[in-house]
Image (cartoon, rainbow, N blue to C red):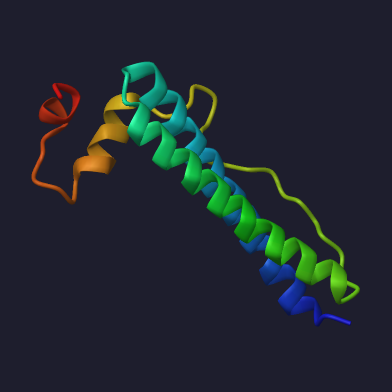
């Protein structure tokens, strides 16, 4: 049997992994619409990676007799991510400005 504290922590981690996947999925949509198929493809790979992480925790809980408790995701809000904020996040650690990024 999995200890309750560990089960709760793993259920929270499942939520975080799914929120990350959802965030990356919103980036896929943006890059597809903006005409950046390579970036969209890379973000799709990130979506799959996060889903794989979530499923590892999911399986671990079940294999040890625990209960998976899926929680509401709180990533995008009603209107999704604002595209300029997304670009700012993506370019904040790079030398490119958001304007340069979109003018490729």
Q: Position of residue 74 (x, y in %)?
A: 57, 42
Q: Quadrant of the C terminus?
A: top left
In the image, is 49 to the left or to the right of 52? Answer: left
Q: Is residue 15 above or below residue 90?
A: below
Foreground residue among 43 and 78: 43
Q: Quadrant of residue 30?
A: top left
Please report the residue visible at 51 percent of the width from the left and 35 percent of the height from the top. 25
Q: How many marks?
A: 0
Q: Residue 93 at what x, y percent from top left?
A: 18, 51
In the rendered image, residue 29, in percent from the top left (x then y), is placed at: 46, 25
Name the residue located 77 percent from the left edge and 71 percent from the top edge: 60
Give x and y (percent) for residue 70: 76, 51
| The one of 47 and 23 positioned closer to us in this rendering | 47
Tell me which corner region of the image, top left, top right, bottom left or bottom right, holds residue 14. bottom right
Query: Is residue 31 toward the left or the right of residue 67 in the image?
Result: left
Task: Please report the residue visible at 54 percent of the width from the left and 24 percent of the height from the top.
Answer: 78
**Residue 91 as seen in the image, left or right of residue 53:** left
Q: Is 17 located above or below residue 104 in the figure?
A: below
Residue, x 48% and y 26% (percent of image)? 80
Q: Nearer the viewer, residue 6 or 102?
A: 102
| Quarter occupied by the N terminus | bottom right
Q: Name the side, left or right, on which 38 lies relative to 55.
A: left
In this rendering, is residue 79 above or below 75?
Answer: above
């Amino acid at each position: 049997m999995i200890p309750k504290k560990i089960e709760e922590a793993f259920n929270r981690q499942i939520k975080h992994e799914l929120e990350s996947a959802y965030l990356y999925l919103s980036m896929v949509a943006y890059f597809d619409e903006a005409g950046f198929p390579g970036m969209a493809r890379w973000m799709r790979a990130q979506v799959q990676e996060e889903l794989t992480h979530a499923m590892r925790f999911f399986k671990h809980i079940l294999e040890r007799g625990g209960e998976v408790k899926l929680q509401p995701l709180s990533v995008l809000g009603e209107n999704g991510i604002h595209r300029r904020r997304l670009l700012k996040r993506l370019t904040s650690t790079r030398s490119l400005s958001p304007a340069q990024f979109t003018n490729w």
